[in-house]
Amino acid sequence: MKIGNKKDALVTGGTIDCIHGDIVHCFLVNSSIWFGLSILGYALYNMRRPETEVLPDERTEKNGQRAGYAAFRIILVSAGLLLLADERGLCNLEIGGALSSTIIIGMFSFVILRWHYNMINSE
């Protein structure tokens, strides 16, 4: 099998890893591959935009800071709840699962809160 470019190699590697691994590991590997490719595409798109369009105004920076502070508090609360649940014996957590879920919670909360604050201030 001849692999034409690096993207095919990544997808093929993720698929081969799924054959020999469990379903959770398969999901994490493939989702990280697609997330990385989408971030690369977003970065390439932003590189080609004119500089006057890229510079954020004060309102956007303030909304990003507010969303960052709120997302950090959400990360702390979710990590605390996971540790409390593990301490009480409600669930048997491994450190990798707890950290990955906390990071995913933080990323999604930051994106949603930044969108929310931009919608509130644009009215």
Image: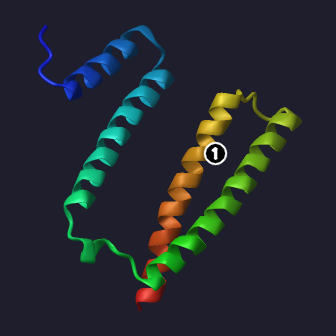
The quadrant of the rendering that contains the C terminus is bottom left
Q: Picture coordinates of residue 23 (x, y %)?
A: 46, 21
Is 27 located above or below residue 37 in the figure?
Answer: above
* Residue 100 x %, y %: 59, 37
Residue located 75% across and 27% down the image: 92
Rendered-image quadrant of the N terminus: top left
Q: Is residue 3 above or below residue 61?
A: above
Q: Position of residue 89 (x, y in %)?
A: 84, 32
Q: Position of residue 5 (x, y in %)?
A: 16, 25
Sort mark 1 into few (<14), some (14-19) or many (20+) by Cα contacts within 10 Å: some
In the rendered view, does 36 fall on the left or right side of 9?
right
Q: Residue at x 26, y 72 (%)?
A: 51
Specify how the rendered protein is coloured: rainbow
Instruction: Name the foreground residue: 90 vs 42.
Output: 42
At 62% from the left and 62% from the top, the residue drawn is 71
Q: Indicate the amino acid at tag 1.
A: Thr
Tag 1's secondary structure?
A: helix
**Residue reaching furthest to the bottom:** 123
Toward the viewer: 38 or 30?
Answer: 38
Q: Is residue 8 left or right of residue 34?
A: left
Q: Residue furthest right?
A: 88
Tell which of 109 and 92 is nearer to you.
109
Give left or right: position of 70 versus 28: right
Mark 1, residue position: 102
